Image (cartoon, rainbow, N blue to C red):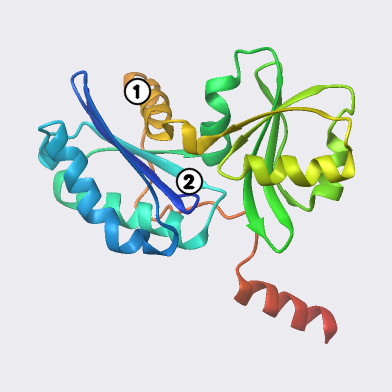
Amino acid sequence: MKVIAIDCASPCMTISAENDGLNSTRILDIGMHQSERIIPEIQNVLQDVKLNPQELQFACLCKGPGTFTGLRLAYAALKGIQLSYKFPIYSFDSLEVYALPFLNLNKSVLSCIDAKKNRFYTSIYRQDTLSIGPIDEEISKIKKYIDEEEELLITGPDAELFADELKLINPTQKIIVKESKNINTGCQLIKLGKISFENKLEGIKDFEGPVYIRPSEAEEAKLNNSTSS
């Protein structure tokens, strides 16, 4: 298949392309510089697999939760290409993408992204099924969803940070850490995208954008003002 996938849900950007079995991935932990590199890196991975944009059958990306700027960048980049060449774009939950490689291990899997302000975007999977999430909470509140006796596999861009903070609250928790920086999330997106494409599912609508589970700073300020008035 001929496909491109982008994960910009965290400061570590992953872009993958596949052209009938030929694969290429670029993983760049570049934080706020994603906007400078996303278009050149899209061009690079397409060149790596000798794929022209007009040949793309579909594309896929992380829809959120994640960083406001990164998610918008991925949508804007793929929609810009789609405007010229007309192919479906499939979007998938970021936390599910990070958890996907571990869902067949018969373990409780916690997928997380640092949401700043002492909070994490989090989903918990048990027996290959979403049990909790996605939520946007402090670890002290997330802890109530975790059985102290269960072995917990923590994954996602900020798995190590989450694990360190959880250990401070519950030092006896059994933890395995698998940061998504060591996982090709682009390939995971492509796997999910192939299922959608083969089942002839419809891609995102023109008006659809990232999914945010936290209000923007402007929305929070407006909410606080209305509450105090």
**Dot 1, how many residues are within 10 Å of its Cα: few (below 14), some (14-19), or many (20+)?**
some
Q: Label 2, label 1: how many angstroms apart (C-alpha)?
A: 17 Å
- Give left or right: position of 96 versus 57: right
- Give left or right: position of 30 versus 126: left
Q: Amino acid at mark 1?
A: Lys
How many discs appear?
A: 2
Q: Is residue 224 above or below residue 171?
A: below
The circle drawn on residue 76 is none
Q: Is residue 184 above or below residue 134?
A: above
User: Could you say where residue 228 lies in the image, as x and y percent from the top left?
Assistant: 84, 83
User: Could you say where residue 214 lies in the image, as x and y percent from the top left?
Assistant: 65, 59
Q: Is residue 56 above or below residue 114?
A: above
- Give left or right: position of 179 versus 87: right
User: Could you say where residue 48 lies in the image, as x and y percent from the top left?
Assistant: 15, 35
Q: Which quadrant would residue 100 be assigned to in this image?
A: top right
Residue under circle 1?
194
Give the quadrant of the N terminus: top left
Q: Is residue 79 above or below residue 204?
A: below
> Which numbered disc, 2 or 1, marks the residue that appears first in the sequence?
2
Give the quadrant of the C terminus: bottom right
- Residue 34 visible in image: yes
Residue under circle 2?
63
Q: Which quadrant would residue 69 be assigned to in this image?
A: bottom left
Residue extending furthest bottom? 229
Residue plotted at (89% across, 22% down): 149
- Residue 82 visible in image: no
Residue plotted at (85% across, 45% down): 168
